[in-house]
Image (cartoon, rainbow, N blue to C red):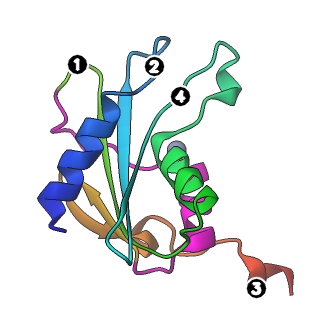
Amino acid sequence: MERKELFAEAVKAAEMSYSKYSGFSVGAALLTVDGLVFKGCNIENASFSLTNCAERTAVFKAVSEGYMNFSAIAIAGSSGGDFSKPCYPCGACLQVLSEFCGDDLIIILSDGEYKLSDFLPKRFCEESMK
Ligand SMILES: [Zn+2]
């Protein structure tokens, strides 16, 4: 799947965003190594700390369906329907992605393509506990 196609899937996922408090819609499209796409959106809550990001929604959907090997994720965010400004993943989502993905996971944003290691060069992982 091409970068632009996966980003378009992320924009589609943002349409399902439940963001009544912030008005900021985010969608994520997570590509498995098998070529499947799991989409997720941000899901807000009146108790703000319980809000879940689009990226983690996509990861949790995929893992709960038995998929744990990913090659790329596209992320799109907008407060008014314009997805041209990059929506960088938050620290919590980077940590969750790092549980299942290597440093070379491709992260596709509106301004280009990155790797997980660009945002999270060092991380807490299984090896950290040994
Ligand atoms: Zn996040």
Q: Secondary structure at mark 2?
A: loop
Q: CA distance from mark 4 to mark 1?
A: 17 Å
- Identified by mark 4, the residue type is Ile
Task: Name the disc covering residue 127, or none.
Answer: 3
Looking at the rendered image, the quarter that the C terminus falls into is bottom right
User: Is 99 inside the magenta-drawn segment?
Assistant: yes
The residue segment tinted magenta is: 82-104
- According to the picture, the residue beneath numbered tag 1 turns out to be 80
- Upstream in sequence: badge 2 or badge 4: 2
> In the image, residue 93 lies at what x, y percent?
55, 52
Disc 1 to disc 3: CB gap under 8 Å: no
Left or right of 114, for residue 56? right
Q: Is residue 123 above or below residue 12?
A: below
Disc 4 to disc 1: CB gap under 8 Å: no
> In the image, residue 69 lies at what x, y percent?
50, 76
Question: Does the beta carbon at disc 1 come under 8 Å from ligand 1?
Answer: no
- According to the picture, the residue beneath numbered tag 2 turns out to be 19
- Upstream in sequence: badge 1 or badge 3: 1
Residue ID at (22%, 19%) = 80
Q: Quadrant of residue 45?
A: top right
Mark 4 Cα-neighbour bin, 10 Å: few <14, some 14–19, many ≥20: some
Q: CA distance from mark 1 to mark 3?
A: 42 Å
Left or right of 89, for residue 92? right
Question: Does the beta carbon at disc 2 come under 8 Å from ligand 1?
Answer: no
Depth check, mark 4 against mark 1: the one in front is: 4
Q: Secondary structure at mark 3?
A: helix
- Upstream in sequence: badge 3 or badge 4: 4
Task: Name the disc covering residue 28, or none.
Answer: none
Task: Name the disc covering residue 43, or none.
Answer: 4
Q: CA distance from mark 2 to mark 3?
A: 36 Å
Q: Is residue 103 above or below residue 55?
A: below
Disc 2 to disc 3: CB gap under 8 Å: no
